Image (cartoon, rainbow, N blue to C red):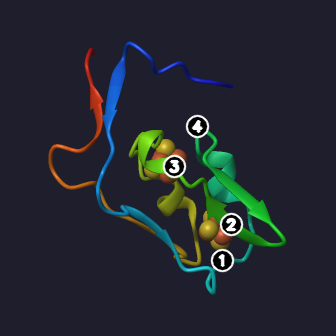
Amino acid sequence: MKIELEGLSKHIPSTSNFITIDKSKCNGCNQCAIICIVNLWKVKDGVASIIDDYKTKCLECGSCAQVCEPGAINFMYPEGGTGIVYQYG
Ligand code: SF4
Ligand code: SF4
């Protein structure tokens, strides 16, 4: 399923990395890829990675970090004034 965000939100890309992954902890379970509604994660050869330009597409829901049982994903909200901005609703 694809969510069309245009018109509902805008992104002001964060200048800092607000999602990081410790690949040494990743067990390749694929839960991050399953939970991410905008499909930013890929698991290849048993290790997860997020797309390079995730800052412009991430909804900052934090779900990927929540479902990662080994704690391989670190999520922090972008610093104030950056990230996703919801224009309606
Ligand atoms: S949820 Fe965590 S352990 Fe599972 S594939 Fe994603 S990063 Fe790796
Ligand atoms: S915070 Fe949400 S939208 Fe962003 S990468 Fe994680 S699951 Fe996907």
In the image, residue 62 above or below residue 85:
below
Residue tagged 2: 48
SS state under label 2: strand
Q: Disc 1 residue type?
A: Cys
Upstream in sequence: badge 2 or badge 4 = 4
Q: How many marks?
A: 4
Tell me: 36 left or right of 56: right
Q: Which residue is drawn at 60% across and 53% down?
A: 51
| Image coordinates for residue 65, horizontal then vertical, percent | 48, 62
Crowd class of label 3 (few under 14; some 14 to 19; many from 20; radius 10 Å): few
Q: Which of marks 3 and 2 is in front?
A: 3
- Report if the beta carbon of the residue with label 1 is closer than 8 angstroms to ligand 1: yes
- Report if the beta carbon of the residue with label 4 is closer than 8 angstroms to ligand 2: yes
The N terminus sits in image quarter: top right
Residue tagged 4: 37
> Could you give the CA–CA distance between mark 3 and mark 2, rounded to whole angstroms?
15 Å
In the image, residue 80 above or below residue 23:
above
Upstream in sequence: badge 3 or badge 2 = 2
- Report if the beta carbon of the residue with label 2 is closer than 8 angstroms to ligand 1: yes
Residue tagged 3: 53
Q: Disc 2 residue type?
A: Ala
Residue tagged 1: 26
> Could you give the CA–CA distance between mark 1 and mark 4, rounded to whole angstroms?
20 Å
